Image (spheres, coloured by chain):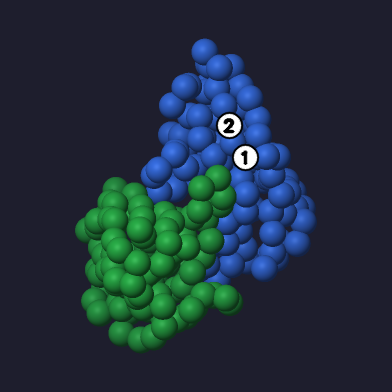
Chain colours: A green, B blue
Amino acid sequence: GAVVSQHPSWVICKSGTSVKIECRSLDFQATTMFWYRQFPKQSLMLMATSNEGSKATYEQGVEKDKFLINHASLTLSTLTVTSAHPEDSSFYICSARETGATNSPLHFGNGTRLTVT
Amino acid sequence: DAKTTQPNSMESNEEEPVHLPCNHSTISGTDYIHWYRQLPSQGPEYVIHGLTSNVNNRMASLAIAEDRKSSTLILHRATLRDAAVYYCILNQGGKLIFGQGTELSVKP
């Protein structure tokens, strides 16, 4: 089955530093990937849609300069949390579906637990 | 965004069927209904999806109302490993917007 790999699975960083999270589709190509954030005891919140070869589309209220998204190939999207602060501590989850299959299921990574101290 | 409404929590006994309801009264004609589940500290896992007809797979069945304003996820025999948060989501143009989901607990 389709697999999405997310790395790292957890990271601890100091306030003011930047952290990069990778999302890879291992056995399929994904023109579009999605980034979500999840706080404890809450549902997933869609942050942005990552489009291969073009700019990401951000949801309302998500700062594009703080959450940099790069989707340089059909199998890799990265999310960089810039100048991280403790309030950015959260569970970040990426997802992807096969190119051209808009109504097919999304495949999710196992998430990255970010803790900013 | 069209929204879905689910009960916050449900309980089930092991090896009994479970029916998880979902209301989506503002669904449009091209919106697929997706179900995912999430275990603690993991990414969501796909369960099933459908458009109009009922669907079956190895994990569950999806019963869709004739007017498509509601659907029910059916786990035929709940196991302890089925305890999770279940999300019913409308696929609108490829985007999935998660609601609060139903937390299912399974008692042995």
Place residue B29 in its image quadrant.
bottom right
Amino acid at dot 2:
Leu
Q: Residue at the spot x=46%, y=73% of the render? A: A48
* Residue B47 x %, y %: 48, 43
Q: CA distance from mark 1 to mark 2?
A: 6 Å
* Residue B14 x %, y %: 53, 16
Subunit ID for the residue under disc 1: B
Q: Residue at the spot x=69%, y=54% of the render? A: B4
* The furthest residue to the top: B108
Amino acid at dot 1:
Thr
Mark carried by residue B104: 2
Place residue B17 in its image quadrant.
top right
Residue toward you, A104 or A15: A15
Q: Residue at the spot x=55%, y=17% of the render? A: B107
* Residue A96 x %, y %: 37, 63
A32 vs A110: above or below:
below
Name the element at disc 1: strand
B54 left or right of B38 in image: right
1 and 2 marks in contact (CB < 8 Å): yes
Residue under pointer 1 = B102
